Image (cartoon, rainbow, N blue to C red):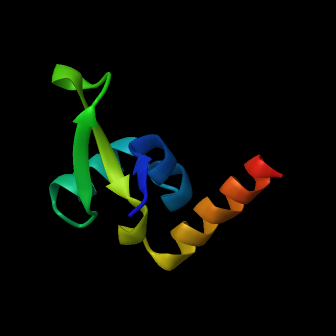
Amino acid sequence: MTWISTIEAAYVLEITERAVREQAYSDILEHRYTSGKGRSGKTLQISLESLPPAAQMRYQVIQDKQTS
């Protein structure tokens, strides 16, 4: 499973980061917390596989451009 940041998820979904967090909290998007810089030292990550296919494709295109 591939985990991405809420910022990346917001970009490929074309919504705000707050909307991504709300969808995660409502269990619309699969998510997890990891150690990081967020509140209480936690960072919210979103499962790429839980995003719609079009958003997954946008993410892959971006990744391909960065590695080329």
| Left or right of 51 on screen, residue 35 | left
Quarter of the image where one finds residue 62: bottom right
**Residue extending furthest toward the bottom:** 53
Please provide percent x and percent y for residue 63: 67, 54
Q: In which quadrant is the N terminus drawn?
A: bottom left
Q: Is residue 45 above or below residue 51?
A: above
The residue at 22%/42% (across/down) is: 33
Q: In this view, does 38 lie above or below 60?
A: above
Q: Is 47 in front, or is 21? A: 47
Please provide percent x and percent y for residue 11: 54, 50
| Left or right of 39 on screen, residue 5 | right
Quarter of the image where one finds residue 43: top left
Please provide percent x and percent y for residue 29: 28, 63
| Left or right of 28 on screen, residue 54 | right
Q: Is 25 in front, or is 40? A: 40
The residue at 43%/63% (across/down) is: 48
| Left or right of 64 on screen, residue 48 | left
Number of numbered tags placed on the structure image: 0
Please provide percent x and percent y for residue 59: 59, 60
Q: In this view, does 2 lie above or below 21?
A: below
**Residue extending furthest toward the right:** 68
